Image: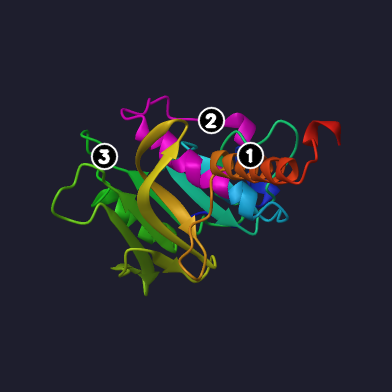
Amino acid sequence: MLLNYNPRHCLPSAEDLPDSDDTPVDNQLQDLIPHILQTILALIWSERQDWYFGVDMGIYYDPNEPAIVPDGFLSIGVPRIIDEDLRLSYVLWEEQKVPILALEVVSQTRRKEYTEKKDFYAEMGILYYVIYNPLRKRKPRLEVYQLNNGNYELLPGEIIWLSELNLGIGKEIGTYQGIKREWLYWYDQDGKRYLTPEERALQAQERTKKLEEKLRSLGVDPDQL
């Protein structure tokens, strides 16, 4: 893997490289599931600027090879925002940081998530590899692997604690963008699920409604405050 960037090598920049592989996702979940994790992370890490979560974005690891495009990936220790144009792609010899987590959402069209991609992410040195397969009936739909001495080891649990991120990841039934189904979520160290922006807004509305009802019961018109 090429990480040591030297300007004299005249390596291509993100602007010189294609910003995707032009391959459309073949399942809407491959877009929605990474986005729900991204949007929740933007809330719980709102004060931090040292992370980046890419969705369906190319990771360039070698100037002579095409990018690899996970459904989602997380990198720590890089600027969240480079400039107003944002990132076109993730170029390792510019970023100087290998992503700490890669996510793949499996559809009916297999893309070698359990074989070649898994081996490749291990070779890249990505610490956590998350595979979510909503089509599975007997085997676990969510698997999280951690790199240990160059090989991925399956982490146990329904909510899997990612110690390097100080976050847990798991799955449960919820509603996102009006769709009720099983989604992936982030969790705190006590196993409490972090809310989505929609859920936070609804929670705030319910609190406001209860406060208004309480004021009215005390003879106060909240509309006059």
Asked whether residue 95 is in view, the answer is no
- Give the mark nearest the N terminus, 2 or 1: 2
As drawn, which residue projects farthest toward the right? 225
Give the secondary structure at mark 2.
Answer: loop
Coloring scheme used: rainbow
| x 76%, y 46%: residue | 218
Residue 166: which quarter of the image?
A: bottom right
Residue 103, position in %: x, y?
Answer: 40, 49
The amino acid type found where label 3 is placed reads Arg
Residue 16 falls inside the magenta stretch: yes
Which range of residues does the magenta coloring cover? 13-40
Looking at the rendered structure, which numbered label has been put on residue 205?
1
Q: Which residue is mark 3?
A: 111
Q: Amino acid at mark 2?
A: Asp
> Nearer the viewer's eye, disc 3 or disc 2?
3
Q: Is any atom of residue 8 visible in this view? A: yes
Q: What secondary structure is marked by label 3?
A: loop
Q: Which of 179 and 161 lies nearest the eye of the viewer?
A: 179
Taking the magenta stretch, the answer to whether it contains residue 30 is yes
Q: Is residue 201 left or right of residue 21?
A: right
Up/down of 6 relative to 21, above or below: below
Q: Residue furthest left?
A: 138
State the residue in front, 123 or 201: 201
| Cα distance between the residues tagged 1 and 3 | 42 Å
What percent of the width, then of the height, locates residue 27? 32, 30
Q: Which percent across, then down, holds residue 98?
A: 53, 57
